Image (cartoon, rainbow, N blue to C red):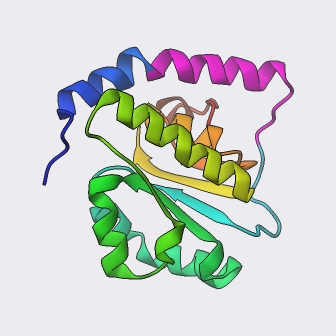
Amino acid sequence: MGLPLRVSVLQRADRVVFAPICFALTVFRRITGGRDATAPPDPKSILFVKLAEQGSTVLAAGAIRRAIDRVGRDNVYFLVFEENRFILDVMGLVPEENVLTVPTRSTLGMARGALAALRRLRARGIDAAVDLEFFARFSAVLTYLSGARYRVGSTRTSARGRTAATS
């Protein structure tokens, strides 16, 4: 079952829409005194963001298990595209209610779903977030807006030694 929204649409949105949003969030973080944080000494909850192509989630199972050992199964969360949820259900690493999904049937539905997921994450007070997407700005924005104080992920700018909104 592929994405109802074409991949080319998502890639274009990532470039055209989310590049300026990442820039704005980076400026906001710097203006408001946000700082780059090291790993939390004792996180109480951890979010993994892996929207598409869940093969990486299977490969990251060891890291997920370590997060579970550290904070407990009930305190590990995942944010994924709706149609990719099944792999997390099959893996059974985290409770089903800790898997938050973003629909991809339409652009408006995706926006509404992402906002709903962010509200739920912020209400839970997530301490740390790990963005498992590679160089995707949409997931970087979601990771930053999750409310997690400690965030890590792959960004083009961090590859060159500078920070971005998700750093």
Residue that appears at 42% across and 76% down: 61
Between residue 5 and residue 127, name the one nearer to us: 5
Between residue 161 and residue 67, name the one nearer to us: 67
Q: Quadrant of the N terminus?
A: bottom left
Left or right relative to 24: residue 50:
left
Q: Is residue 20 magenta?
A: yes
Q: Residue furthest right?
A: 33
Where 118 sits versus 6, above or below?
Answer: below
| Percent of width and height locating residue 163 | 64, 31
Residue stretch rendered in magenta on the structure: 18-36
| Percent of width and height locating residue 31 | 82, 18
Residue that appears at 76% across and 67% down: 43
Q: Quadrant of the C terminus?
A: top right
Residue that appears at 71% across and 45% down: 147
Left or right relative to 122: residue 98:
left
Left or right relative to 107: residue 118:
right
Residue 10 visible in the displayed image? yes
Q: Is residue 21 magenta?
A: yes
Where 103 sits versus 90, above or below?
Answer: above
| Percent of width and height locating residue 12 | 28, 21
Dominant secondary-structure state across the stretch colored magenta: helix
